[in-house]
Amino acid sequence: MKIVLTDAQTVTQGDLSLEPLKEFGEVEINLLTPDEKIAETVMDADAIICNKTPLNAETLRLASRLKYIGLFATGYNNIDTDYCRERGITVCNAGSYSTDAVCQHTFALILECLNRVGDYSRFVSEGNWKNSTTFSPFVYPLSEIAGKTLGIVGCGSIGSAVARVARAFNMNVLAYRRSGRGEDGFVDLDTLLRGSDIVTVHCPLNDDSYRLFDEKTFAKMKDGAIFVNTARGAIMDENAVAAALESGKLAYAAIDVLEQEPMARDCVLCGAKNCIITPHIAWAPMETRERLMGIVCDNLRAFLNGTPKNVVN
């Protein structure tokens, strides 16, 4: 079979081997495929492996041999799953591969807001400690994580992992998900917003969650709360985040995702007050990407054996 990778550069920049995919047939590696070139790039593919490439009726119109799409991702909002189902194309994602990594990054962002490690490191590197009159110049406010209430929006694999770590930090945990089912601590969204010192987002992007965090949502949160988003950028209204930061409604926003990626040149959050942004790298530790490659290969192997798994359509 012919396997076409459309955006290999999104999972490896030479550090992660793509050799395991050659077990299954001829592999064509495209580092990044412009949208206008997708249709011709995949026209003779039996299988496509991608991360964020948009695959829909337009980009797949020439792919008459296509039977399988494998994702280097958990989210699949870039795939028209209804169209693929109609065409008999199986779509499989890589669920749960990044749980530990995203949980780790979530707390890295939270702790940066509370401990100001970057600010204090810069304070020292600029020579200010040398000129201090005290041995402990606490020039930036610090805050303990213990005792704070963490509101988790979306409590699947990642959200559940975040809850476990939060409890280890002696935090109080509130959680919300649409089904409302699960462990004690699940509440409606308004209750979570009112009661949380920190709100962290771990839900998928869909019609219900698109710009869920807007001006009205932030208005329901505690004054001086912290907002964390490591899920999808379009779950928040970036203008509303900037306004909440400027007004002081939010003390901090700590964000790993934006609606447009790479960041737009006129992004309202670039340089916004008390806004920490990392470039969608919560999922990207080496160990995580190695695990991802293993799941992608397992998914393709299962499909070829007639027992597909992690099917999303």
Image (cartoon, rainbow, N blue to C red):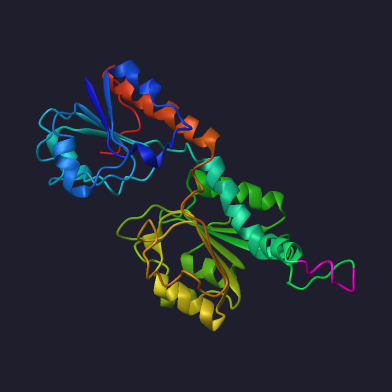
Magenta region's main secondary structure?
loop
Relative to 94, is 253 on the left or the right? right
| Front one among 10 and 242 | 10
Q: Place residue 53 in its image quadrant.
A: top left
The vertical placement of 258 against 163, above or below, is below
Q: Residue furthest right?
A: 134
Q: Which image quarter holds the N terminus? A: top left
Residue 275: x and y in percent read 54, 68
| Front one among 122 and 312 | 122
Q: Which image quarter holds the C terminus? A: top left
Q: Residue furthest bottom?
A: 247
Visible residue check, residue 132 = yes
- Residue drawn at (77%, 73%), measured in percent from left and top? 139
- Residue drawn at (86%, 67%), measured in percent from left and top? 136
Count every numbered label the image shows and give the total: 0
| Residue 128 magenta-highlighted | yes
| Magenta residues, start to end | 127-134
Residue 88: x and y in percent read 15, 32
Relative to 71, is 190 on the left or the right? right
The vertical placement of 49 against 83, above or below, is above
Visible residue check, residue 219 = no
Residue 231: x and y in percent read 45, 54
The vertical placement of 157 against 192, above or below, is above
- Residue drawn at (90%, 71%), measured in percent from left and top? 134
| Front one among 92 and 180 | 92
Residue 174: x and y in percent read 58, 60
